[in-house]
């Protein structure tokens, strides 16, 4: 059908589900393909415009924690959804591992939102259960929870008369009252300025802040609430801190991880400002603040390998090792072809598989060893599944023959490794 469309309508933009998402579940597969089709024309214009201005080859960040050349990414724009926060998580992971912390929580606080991810043994956790708004997108992406708690989050009074913060944001323009650009609503940044937690100028004096405007706004809000201005400003920051804590709990406690085991890497324009309060609320062991926290996401882009993901649905309770070996071989051949096009001679393949207990509706993704497929390989993957299931849900059926294990998807990530920048310890 794609060939017919290419012949009859050469100008048409086509997304085909066997390219976009080669696994089952019709609704999710359809919606993921529709999102790909919806963003493709815009992405193509954007990339073409950028290419014309740069006049040099460049790469684009993907949501799976890899990059892809601009020439390739126009054919699969769905792989870039939510890719911005992924770069921050990867940059923070590299900084933390240099400081001797391979497992951390990353907190990227910006103007509009805060993005939180968890890194275990140097690798941010991945999910295929992501969504863009209300549209499920089953492509592999770094598992990031986003809350409307940034520097520009607006403080407002609910119809019941209580103080609320976010998720609406004043943005960068007009921005918080203290920016002096015509903002009319009190924000988290104004509370910081009022309490003296932010200096009266930013960027070494280049951006002076209007401290009086922040004070007037806080005092006006305090009068409506019947509180002192200091208590109002402290309350705004307290609510924002708890919003961030809820995001951190979603990515740790709800995933079977103990938040007290993980240092926090706080970065982004507003990320480190509430770090001390987060230590109090969550019992975090420590916090790392990189030297230039606002640049960590940009730095993260320089640390990323080229990475492509390939998947094939293969549902069975009794895995035929020869059939599985053939599927992995095909997926690795596809990955090799893409890496060759990108100019890589050194290829790395990371296998994984989605498994579930027979009768379950959703599966758990676990790494699969490289090398030939034999009985010990199968056992290693099944053992990893039991362990992951227990960690995630608090129970497993490792030694219960009544609950068989079912294989659902086989996956390969083709990685073209880059030389990472060296960080000064």
Image (cartoon, rainbow, N blue to C red):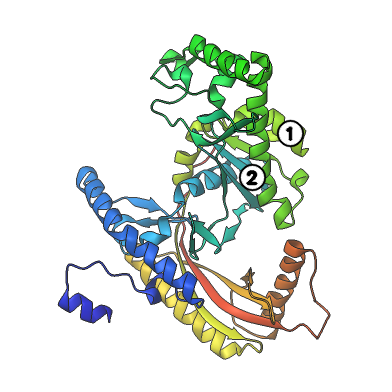
Q: Which of marks 2 and 1 is nearer the N terminus?
A: 2
Residue 407, image x and y in percent? 63, 81
Q: For residue 208, what is the image quadrant?
A: top left
Quick check: 269 left or right of 407? left
Give the CA distance from mark 2 to mark 1: 14 Å
Kindly check if marks 2 and 1 are in contact, taking CB atoms under 8 A apart as contact. no
| Vertical placement of residue 283 versus 46, above or below | above
Q: Which of 160 and 22 is in front in this view?
A: 160
Dot label at residue 279: 1
- In the picture, the quarter occupied by the N terminus is bottom left
Residue 421, image x and y in percent? 48, 43
Q: Residue furthest front?
A: 159
Q: Which residue lies furthest to the top in this view?
A: 212
| Vertical placement of residue 99 versus 38, above or below | above
Instruction: Give the labeled residue for mark 2.
Output: 247
Residue 389, image x and y in percent? 73, 68
Q: Nearer the viewer, residue 113 or 203?
A: 113
Residue 170, image x and y in percent? 46, 30
> Going 83% across and 81% down the picture, which residue do you hit?
400
Camera-side mark, 2 or 1: 2
Q: Is any atom of residue 70 visible in this view?
A: yes
Pointer 1 local density, CA inside 10 Å: few below 14, some 14–19, many at least 20: some
> Going 42% across and 77% down the picture, which residue do you hit?
333
Q: Is any atom of residue 344 visible in this view?
A: no
Q: For residue 394, what is the image quadrant?
A: bottom right
Q: Is mark 1 on a helix, strand or loop?
A: helix
> Going 48% across and 72% down the picture, which residue do you hit?
27
Dot label at residue 227: none
| Vertical placement of residue 84 versus 285, above or below | below
| Vertical placement of residue 95 versus 177, above or below | below
Q: Is mark 2 on a helix, strand or loop?
A: helix
Pointer 2 local density, CA inside 10 Å: few below 14, some 14–19, many at least 20: many
């Amino acid at each position: 059908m794609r060939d017919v469309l290419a012949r009859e309508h050469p100008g048409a933009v086509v997304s085909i589900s066997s390219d976009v998402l080669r696994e089952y579940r019709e609704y999710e597969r359809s919606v993921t393909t529709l999102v790909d089709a919806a963003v493709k024309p815009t992405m193509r214009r954007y990339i073409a415009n950028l290419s014309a201005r740069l006049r040099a080859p460049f790469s684009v960040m993907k949501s799976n924690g890899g990059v892809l050349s601009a020439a390739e990414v126009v054919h699969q724009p769905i792989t870039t959804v939510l890719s911005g926060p992924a770069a921050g998580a990867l940059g923070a992971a590299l900084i933390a591992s240099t400081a001797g912390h391979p497992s951390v929580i990353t907190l990227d606080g910006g103007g509009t939102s805060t993005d939180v991810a968890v890194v275990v043994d140097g690798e941010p956790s991945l999910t295929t259960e992501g969504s863009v708004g209300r549209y499920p997108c089953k492509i592999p992406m770094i598992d990031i929870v986003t809350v409307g708690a940034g520097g520009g989050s607006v403080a407002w009074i609910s119809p019941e008369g209580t103080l609320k913060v976010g998720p609406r944001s004043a943005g960068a323009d007009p921005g918080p009252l203290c920016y002096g650009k015509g903002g009319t609503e009190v924000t988290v940044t104004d509370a910081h300025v009022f309490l003296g937690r932010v200096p009266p100028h930013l960027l070494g004096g280049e951006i002076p802040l209007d401290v009086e405007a922040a004070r007037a706004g806080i005092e006006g809000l305090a009068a409506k609430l019947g509180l002192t201005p200091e208590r109002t400003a402290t309350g705004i920051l307290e609510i924002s801190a708890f919003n961030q804590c809820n995001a951190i709990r979603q990515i740790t406690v709800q995933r079977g991880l103990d938040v007290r085991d993980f240092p926090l890497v706080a970065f982004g324009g507003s990320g480190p400002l509430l770090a001390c309060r987060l230590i109090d609320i969550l019992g975090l062991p420590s916090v790392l603040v990189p030297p230039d926290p606002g640049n960590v996401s940009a730095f993260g882009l320089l640390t990323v390998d080229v990475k492509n993901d390939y998947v094939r649905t293969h549902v069975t309770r009794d895995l035929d090792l020869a059939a599985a070996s053939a599927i992995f071989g095909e997926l690795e051949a596809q990955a090799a072809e893409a890496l060759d096009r990108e100019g890589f001679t050194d290829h790395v393949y990371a296998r994984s598989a989605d498994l579930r207990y027979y009768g379950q509706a959703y599966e758990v993704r676990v790494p699969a060893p490289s090398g030939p497929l034999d009985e010990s390989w199968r056992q290693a993957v099944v053992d990893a599944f039991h362990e992951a299931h227990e960690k995630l849900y608090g129970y497993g059926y490792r030694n219960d023959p009544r609950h068989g294990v079912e294989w659902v998807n086989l996956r390969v990530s083709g990685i073209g490794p880059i030389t990472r920048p060296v960080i000064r310890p």
